[in-house]
Image (cartoon, rainbow, N blue to C red):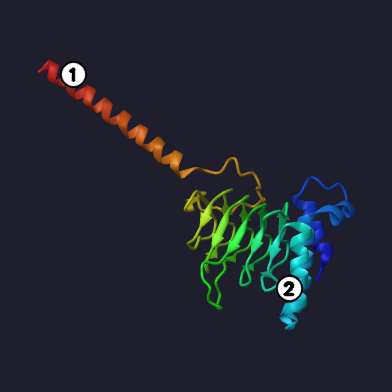
Amino acid sequence: MDWKADVYTVLERDPAPRSFGEALMFSQGLHAILMQRISHNLYLRGQYKIARLINYWSRVLTGADIHPGATIGKGFFIDHATGVVIGETTIINDNVSIFQGVTLGGVSTSKKKRHPTIGNNVTIGANASVLGDITIGDNVKIGAGSVVVKDVPPNTTVVGIPGRVVKRNGEREKVLDLTHENLPDPLIDTIADLVNSISALEKKVEELEEKLKKD
């Protein structure tokens, strides 16, 4: 376990800590990740009770409930751990960032794979829920409060309830962008399209009225 790499990930993505030591001592998200990595190693060795005990105390200390069975890659970052829930069969690949209140949960009680698989370079906004055995592609951004229950293709943005995919010109974002206020809103876009259509119809009606008057 390269715990130093996890600390440097915090320093890279969180402007609050001013030093390596501050990040190590006071980042609850980091503590949740480090304790999960320890419990995961025990879980893989069949030491389930000890793994679950570490999971229990991690939840008490950090506010995050990350099951020891979850598989988590490099460069994982939690910005505020409070309310984060990650289920047993979740797979998280590299360079993933999530915010407080995120749920990576299941919708089945079966013992098989029932939690999401998260691709590389994914950002999941605060209080978003990704549910079921679905796949979130690489370079995806999920807006705060979104609920995602279907597979999401790579290089896209998802917002809303249920989550709707909005493409960003099909281009990969080269720099990690954690600003959620600029995410597109498909509902607002739809309303704008309706307003434009109504304006066009009103103009057509006016033209027809003028033509009738002349005739």
Using the numbered discs, state the Cα–Cα distance from disc 1 to disc 2 in whole angstroms: 77 Å
In the image, residue 62 above or below residue 195? below
The local crowd at label 2, few if under 14, some if 14 to 19, many if 20 or more residues have their Cα within 10 Å, is: many
The local crowd at label 1, few if under 14, some if 14 to 19, many if 20 or more residues have their Cα within 10 Å, is: few
Please state which of residues 86 and 152 is positioned toward the viewer in this rendering: 86
Residue 42: mark in rendering: none
Looking at the image, residue 99 sits to the left or right of residue 169; the answer is right
The type of residue carrying mark 2 is: Arg
Q: Residue 126's spot in the image, x, y percent?
A: 63, 50
User: Where, quadrant-wise, is the C terminus in this rendering?
Assistant: top left
The type of residue carrying mark 1 is: Glu
State the image quarter where residue 38 is shown: bottom right
What secondary structure is found at the residue carrying circle 2?
A: helix
* Residue at the extreme bottom of the image, as rendered: 46
Are the two marked residues, 1 and 2, in contact with CB atoms closer than 8 angstroms?
no
- Say which residue appears at 61% left-offset and 72% top-offset: 89
For mark 2, what is the residue?
52
For mark 1, what is the residue?
210
Q: Residue 209's spot in the image, x, y percent?
A: 18, 21
What secondary structure is found at the residue carrying circle 1?
A: helix
- Say which residue appears at 88% left-offset and 50% top-offset: 19
State the image quarter where residue 179 is shown: top right
* Residue at the extreme left of the image, as rendered: 215
